[in-house]
Image (cartoon, grey):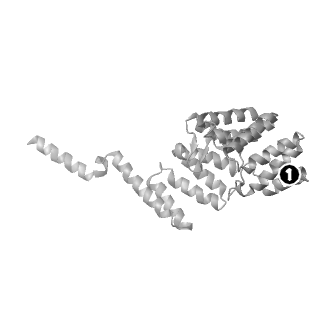
Amino acid sequence: MKNNISYIIALVVCLICFSGCVPDSFKDEKRKEKAREWTEKARSQYGALWTASLDSAIYHYPEGADPYYSKSVRQFRRGDMIEGIRNLDKAAKLDPFNYLNYLGFVHMLYLRDYERAEEIFQIAIDNKIYADIIIAGSAYMRLGIVQYKLGKYEQAIKSFDEEVRRSGEKNAYNYTFVYRGIAKYLSGDKQGALQDFDKAIELWDKCPEAYYRKALVLEEMGDKKMACKMAQKALLNKSFISENPHRSYVDQLHLSDIEELFDRTCR
């Protein structure tokens, strides 16, 4: 009888303090579900309602990265870079696998903050996070780009080398060779640069950036005739110039660049 009374008392206490008897994992799932509902709701909202919904998602589950990321995307689109970076930085800390490389991409492309981007890509690599799943790209390739923009040409070449090693020459993104060629040219290795531009063309024979960069090197080396041929090929493939609708790429190629090179080498 005494044991039964003790059991009943324990059961009553548990019912009164129900939340204290619920496993933490169950509570977390409920909070996550609430946060997901508010985040999904925000997708079709604007202005104050959009902000309120994402703030509600953060309130229910502050450990979740998605609402911070969602905030940052729309803030970038409307030009609010300060708040956008603040929220994306928070998302990257909470979920580095999904958002750390994208944070580096934003610093590289939107802010042209190459020093901070270099730090971020190196942290990603140190933690074996090699790919950006938001904007497709490789941490090693992007690290190489920001390094050569910082004048660290040898380090940049090594980063591109590692990207090629990891992907394999035949499977590597052809622009890896374009950017490595630029780094080699800037380091004084013109022949190495030409070889990389040729490799980029071998992988994709419609790459205007590779033809343009090769023409520049040939022009500087005094081979005006071959430089003209490469400029013509760049013009022929002008419709394939890589462009970003929001920001110019690093060392963005413009049609006017090709036309000026053509005028210098072919006329």
Residue 99, can we see it? Answer: yes
Above-or-below relation of 187 to 95: above
Residue drawn 20% across the image and 48% down it: 11
- Residue 2 x %, y %: 10, 41
- Residue 247 x %, y %: 70, 56
- Residue 109 x %, y %: 69, 50
Using residue 194 as the reference point, say whether residue 96 is left or right of it: left
Which residue is the extreme one toward the right? 267
Residue drawn 79% across the image and 43% down it: 214
Using residue 173 as the reference point, say whether residue 227 is left or right of it: right
Using residue 167 as the reference point, say whether residue 42 is left or right of it: left
For the residue pair 71 and 235, the one nearer the viewer reads as 235
Above-or-below relation of 131 to 238: above
- Residue 90 x %, y %: 56, 48
Image quadrant in which the N terminus is located: top left
Q: How crowded is mark 1: few (under 14 residues within 10 Å), some or many (20 or more)?
A: many
Residue drawn 23% across the image and 49% down it: 13
Q: Mark 1 points at which residue?
A: 261
Which residue is the extreme one toward the left? 1
Q: Secondary structure under badge 1?
A: helix
